[in-house]
Amino acid sequence: MSHFGRSGPPDITDTYSLLVLNITFRTSADDLFPLFDKYGKVVDIFIPRDRRTGESRGFAFVRYKYADEAQKAVERLDGRVVDGREITVQFAKYGPNAERIHKGRITETLPKSRHRSRSRSPRRRYRDDYRDRDYRRRSRSRSWDRYERDRYRHRRSRSPSASPDYYRSRGRGRYDDDDDDDYDRRRQSPIRSRSFDSASPARRSLTPQRSLSPLSRSRSVSPYGHGRDGRSPNSRSVSPRGHPADSRSPSPRHSDDG
DNA sequence: GTTGAGCGTT
């Protein structure tokens, strides 16, 4: 697994939350951990995912143990290119329960009912109706039209982050912190042994193949029992003439005469 | 097969 908080939020009372934006949809917590853990004690990393597809929503939350370490990570990792995209690291403004957070630190807990009227988001959250995620996706990807799909093949040849990258990188040495790579190898965090254990390719042997597809299984559970034909399971229920007379009334009137 | 404003789970 990639996410740390598989059992929910462990302890947000003594941790500083950082919001990571602009990460790729394929970037997982495991990819962010070695990056953020280099600048401080990363207690937990959480990436909001879609309830349906399970894909990353494009941002993540990294919780540090200390504010000064989190502050350093914000300045250092902000603008770093991860998986080909530039990520934006900043302190979380809002907590998981809508608490007010001061630089990632929860300074005040407000009622979930009273202050929720504050304009945090102009539109509804995904959790309110993530089922309708289809329409909200088109809202932000309306530029992704039918003809836009062709130009994607052209732009994929070029680095999408190459343009905005050097704009931000200049003036500030964001790539000079590569020397901190030995930070994580000096201190192996215990959380890493359980989260990065799945990195072994041998683990894939656990799932050699899927024997039955959900579609095939649906036939086995067909009310007809035998659905091998798959095309005439109800041939006995319907007469070749199209009249289901031979199956619904053998001769009810004959015995019901009396 | 993909996308790109924003703030979070059991």
Image: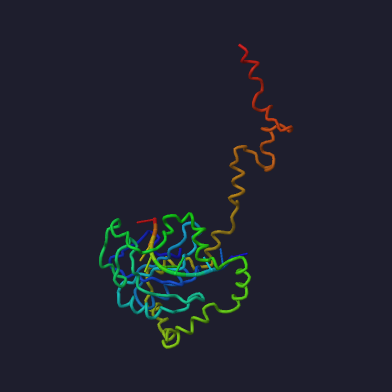
Q: Residue furthest right?
A: A241
Instruction: Name the residue nearer the viewer: A189 or A176.
Output: A176
The x, y position of residue A121, in whole percent, is 39, 63
User: In the figure, is residue A240 to the left or right of A217?
Assistant: right
Q: Is residue A29 shown to the viewer in this render?
A: no
Residue A79 to residue A48: above or below: below
Instruction: Name the residue nearer the viewer: A140 or A111.
Output: A140
Q: How is the image coloured?
A: rainbow
Quadrant of the rendered structure where residue A37 is?
A: bottom left
The x, y position of residue A219, in whole percent, is 62, 44
Q: Quadrant of the C terminus of chain A?
A: top right
Quadrant of the rendered structure where residue A102 is?
A: bottom left
The residue that appears at 66% across and 23% down in the rendered structure is: A250
The residue that appears at 26% across and 62% down in the rendered structure is: A109
Label tally: 0
The x, y position of residue A138, in whole percent, is 53, 62
Q: Residue furthest top?
A: A258
Q: Residue furthest left?
A: A108
Q: Is residue A119 shown to the viewer in this render?
A: yes
The x, y position of residue A59, in whole percent, is 44, 68
The residue that appears at 60% across and 49% down in the rendered structure is: A215
The residue that appears at 55% across and 68% down in the rendered structure is: A143
Q: Residue furthest bottom?
A: A171
